[in-house]
Image (spheres, grey):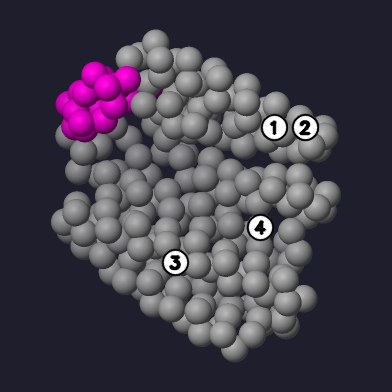
Amino acid sequence: VSIGALNDLVDVERDRVVQPAKPIPAGIVSVRLAAVVVIVGALVGLLVSAWFGWPVLIVGLVGLGCGYAYDLAARRAGLGWLMFAIALPTLLVWAWLAAAGTLPPGWEWLLPLAALAGSALHLGNSMADADADRRSGAVSLATRLGPRRARATLVVLHLLIWALAVLGLALLGSASVEAWSVLLVAMALSLAGVVLSIAPRTAASTVGWMLSAAALAVLAVVWAAAVAGA
């Protein structure tokens, strides 16, 4: 919540031009209230982290730092993908340390997989926003790469994600037939998402990003089921 509110604060002038329906430009939320949300959200999140001990608090600070770095500087330097690549594995480590006091089972495969997924999600999102970014003069990974290289990079990232997922689940050795069937559904969703993401129309790219995110969420459920089976 804190990271998202700061993002809207930083982007408020850009949003007045390209996304006037967002809460602050539309007058639904004031700048002052958004600033309060940034501070209160961070404090509550860090207090929750501290409740589970110093290791969880430190990981929580890393995640919060990634989000703030993304909002304030990294995305404008074309490094938003790096923040996502760090933040998504950090989120998984945070949850498992808090709940079980350990790293996630199969972390050797899961954390690199999450890093790739974070980069792919960021790239897909920046491709959906590329037209608005060009109009406002904003820099993103998609605008830096250009349409052709952005599409090629997105395809490669998704191929790596699913290759790593299949290999990791096979080595875990506890995924059921049903889990593999659901994984195939997730792969089909991902394929549809990539196809739509590389389409020239902004609306199609947005739907493509949503499908890709849904596919990764299904993959997370399959992985959790395999871990439970183990």
User: What separation in Å lies between label 1 and label 2 (alpha carbons)?
Assistant: 5 Å
Q: Is 120 in the magenta?
A: no
Q: Which mark is residue 111?
A: 4
In this view, the residue in front, 98 or 82, is 98
Look at 77% across and 76% down and name the residue there: 230
Query: Horizontally, is 167 left or right of 196 in the view?
Result: right
Residue 63 in picture, x, y percent from top left: 62, 37
Query: Horizontally, is 105 left or right of 127 in the view?
Result: right
Q: Within 10 angstroms of label 1, few (less than 14), some, or many (20 or more) residues?
A: some
Label 3 sits on a secondary structure element that is helix
Tell me which amino acid carries mark 4. Answer: Leu
Q: Quadrant of residue 229?
A: bottom right
Q: Which mark is residue 206?
A: none
Judged by depth in the image, the label closer to the viewer, 4 or 3, is: 3
Query: Horizontally, is 87 left or right of 205 in the view?
Result: right
State if disc 3 and disc 4 touch (CB < 8 Å).
Answer: no
Tell me which amino acid carries mark 2. Answer: Trp
Q: Which mark is residue 51?
A: 2
State if disc 2 and disc 4 touch (CB < 8 Å).
Answer: no
**Which of marks 2 and 4 precedes in the sequence?**
2
Judged by depth in the image, the label closer to the viewer, 1 or 4, is: 1
Q: Quadrant of residue 131?
A: top left
What predominant SS class does the magenta segment belong to?
Answer: loop
Look at the image and give the residue range highlighted in magenta: 10-29
Which residue is identified by label 1? 48
Tell me which amino acid carries mark 1. Answer: Val
Residue 24 in picture, x, y percent from top left: 29, 22
Which residue is identified by label 3? 215
In this view, the residue in front, 134 or 205, is 205
**Which of marks 1 and 3 precedes in the sequence?**
1
Label 2 sits on a secondary structure element that is helix
Residue 171 in picture, x, y percent from top left: 72, 80
